Image (cartoon, rainbow, N blue to C red):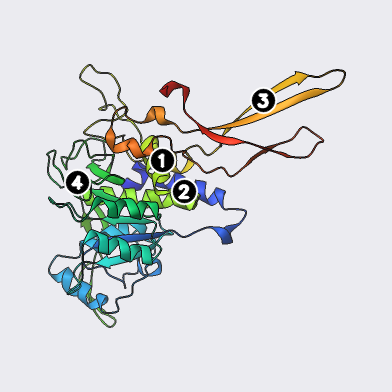
Amino acid sequence: GLWQLRAIRAQEAWAALDLRWSGRPSERPRIRVGVYDGAMATAHPDLAQNLEDDDPSEALATGFAWSLGLAHGVGMMGIIGGTGAPGMIGAAPRSIMIPFHTLRAGRDTSLPAALSYFHAHAVRIANFAIAAAEPLGPAAAVREAAEAGTLVVTGLPNRNAESLSYPAAYPGVVTASGVDNQDEPAGFGWGDLVDVVAPGWGMPTTAAVLRFGTLGWGAPYGHQCCNSVASALTTGAAALILESDPSLTSAQIEKRIKLSARKTAGMRDAHGRPVRWHPRFGYGVLDAYGAVTLDQIGPDLQTSVIPEGRAALMVTVSAIDDILDAYLQPGRARDDHLRGVPTSNIAVVEYRTSPNAWQAVPLEPAEDPASR
């Protein structure tokens, strides 16, 4: 029943990653994902193997939070990184989740404090299930986190309106809104802040259980919905992208998410023409497989061969790595920091003319001709 995994092509992404690391499984990374939310169950069988938590009192607190209906974060972690043993499997089932419990008494829960905590725990992707009407701190905190390697993912407020919210409004944050299983907007928010859409309709996931030792009360699974779910799936997809290449920067991950999103029939302007970006859909429906495999082949080699006399040829080769800016929405200020950013990190390109030795080729990102 986990239709959201089919919708974002998660299984295909897993298969691509299995192939990518098949020759050296010991080197395959496990991406550390931060989850900013309320109480989060550390003992849930679908989560325990993928959790690192430095708060030993949280298990009991989560149980009481469940009894009050506050354990939203438990469901988010299942959607991001549930292991599938025994039940709920997330979008990135090999990720390691680092919870930031906002219900801990006396804790500074501001955005800068949370990002500092995540940085100290080597988190690369951070999910913030919050949509505040006022700024949560200086925008520089998000920029500095991105420069240090942590990408922030969030959702819009769960209402069918265009509204300003934080951290969605900060530059460099990936913002998701929800769609149903027919790729139609689910009425959970729209506007200029939408970067991508993902399944957000009610779906099963992990739930908190009140535990005392080996005894537990409550169902271990429940339903979550709306933009929190969409942002959790986007967080999982971002972790898969990073699993494919841990050297990618936050901007490169963000650009891959946007450029690989699947266009829908509803993404048209007032004249019925297809558009790159749409206020109801952003860049389209999240596509984990498309993001993982984007630009996978690498740069194009351009070769010229010039005769230099009897039985002699001069061979020159250059390598161009497209930056794909032509697929970004023109004039969208929210994407300015992505322009000129290559979608992959190719350290060196080599070629040889048999039987000669391999030679290195200079490599520089090149602007797409279509975007000039």
Earlier-in-chain disc, 4 versus 3: 4
- Of the two numbered discs 2 and 3 on the same chain, state the one appearing first in sequence: 2
- Can you identify the residue that label 2 sits on? 248
Q: Secondary structure at mark 3?
A: strand
Residue at the location (53% across, 57% down)?
A: 28
> Which residue in the protein does label 1 denote?
256
Marks 3 and 1, how far apart at CA: 28 Å
Q: CA distance from mark 4 to mark 2?
A: 26 Å
Q: CA distance from mark 4 to mark 3?
A: 48 Å
Mark 1 or 2, nearer chain start:
2
x, y percentage for residue 178? 23, 43
Q: Are marks 1 and 2 in contact (CB under 8 Å)?
A: yes
Q: Position of residue 202 (x, y in %)?
A: 21, 50
- Quarter of the image with the C terminus is top left
Q: Which residue is mark 4?
A: 156
| Amino acid type of the residue tagged 4 in the rendering | Leu
Distance of mark 4 from mark 1, alpha carbons? 21 Å
| Mark closest to the chain's N terminus, 3 or 1 | 1
Q: Residue 346: x and y, percent? A: 56, 42
Q: Which circle, 4 or 3, is nearer the viewer?
A: 3
The mark lying in front, picked from 4 and 2, is: 2
Between circles 3 and 1, the one closer to the viewer is: 3
CA separation in Å, label 2 and label 3: 28 Å
Horizontally, is 95 left or right of 356 in the view?
Answer: left
SS state under label 4: loop
